[in-house]
Image (cartoon, coloured by chain):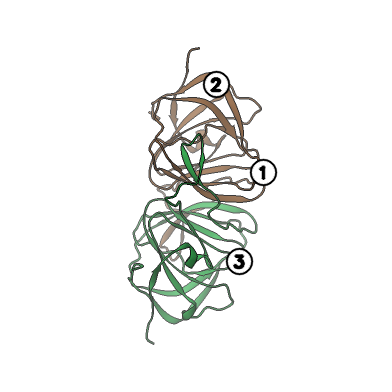
Chain colours: A green, B brown
Amino acid sequence: MDDIHLELEPATAERFAPYGDLIHAPDRVTAAMNDGRFDRFGDLARIDIDGSLAVGIVRSRTATTLPYRVDRVERHPLGSQAFVPLARFAFAVVVAPIGEAVAAEDLRAFWIAPGYGVNYLRGIWHMPLIALQDHQEFLVIDRGGPEPNCEEWLLSESVMLLDSRGT
Amino acid sequence: MDDIHLELEPATAERFAPYGDLIHAPDRVTAAMNDGRFDRFGDLARIDIDGSLAVGIVRSRTATTLPYRVDRVERHPLGSQAFVPLARFAFAVVVAPIGEAVAAEDLRAFWIAPGYGVNYLRGIWHMPLIALQDHQEFLVIDRGGPEPNCEEWLLSESVMLLDSRGT
């Protein structure tokens, strides 16, 4: 079976909106707080949790190199899920719309620039997180608790995420 | 009036527990996820929000230098409030226990090392955020919505936060 090639496109708020939010402080100045010592950028993510919310950290053990074979996607029926890098590094995500099945042509791949995090909407299919370097940390804001909250879809096609780096 | 001197002590999870949580991924390995590509450290903060939760970013406009006069503390009756640095930098916090009044002897100052965030419990008094450098970004997880959720207490004593840097 020939590989289906998936090109990374640069993430913008508009392109990513059907799948979730880019969590980012823009360069423009908005509301000041604390006697003008800070700029505040409020409410950057559509957090949507059915049940208890958990804040955790994940740290990569290994670097995942591109090109990378995407063999599955997952979704979380009980809540949105945010990943915010705890340092300035880029990462790559693959998403597909809400639905009962996923075909290769449903997939889109986004290059997330340094200084940006993502929040997947509840039910959005996404590639399990990969990191391009080891020891990269992400803050995770998602649904806690013991109830099952992760469903996987194994892709029937052979999909290769290319090293196009959003160019 | 003589200044009351407030010394920074290094934050540890145990010392900080009455006031909130330190958000940090320890060096030890815990649960793996995503085929062993990541370590996961779950549920690091006692998020306690009455109403809607908001995820935002604040960015310092200016550096606040130590020693620094602490003239007030604030509290949020409707929810906990977390600040997680989006790069590896240290910061300083001042806290006081839940209560209707705050005296200088109630205050404790903590030096938060690089790689650590904090989550203040609901109702914990704390100094409004300061940053030791400009352009430092923190992710903020707190209570959103228009309802008033910030109460200030003006200290009657003159309190000076010293440049002791947790040593």
Q: Which quadrant would residue B131 be assigned to in this image?
A: top left
Any mark on residue B104, and which?
A: 2
Q: Mark 2 or mark 1, which has the lower sequence index?
A: 2
Q: Quadrant of the N terminus of chain A?
A: bottom left
Question: Label 2 to label 3, Cα distance in Å?
Answer: 48 Å
Q: Which chain is disc 2 placed on?
A: B
- The answer to whether one can see residue B23 in this image is no
**The residue under label 1 is which amino acid type?**
Glu
Which one is in front in this view, the residue at disc 3 or the one at disc 1? 1
Which one is in front in this view, the residue at disc 2 or the one at disc 3? 2
Q: Residue at 36% of width from left, 67% of height from top? A: A166
Same chain for the residues under marks 2 and 3 in the image: no
Residue B100 % position (x, y): 66, 27
From the viewer's perspective, is residue B2 above or below residue A61? above
Q: Which residue is mark 1?
A: B147
Q: Residue at 58% of width from left, 68% of height from top? A: A123
Residue A150 % position (x, y): 56, 66
**The residue under label 2 is which amino acid type?**
Ala
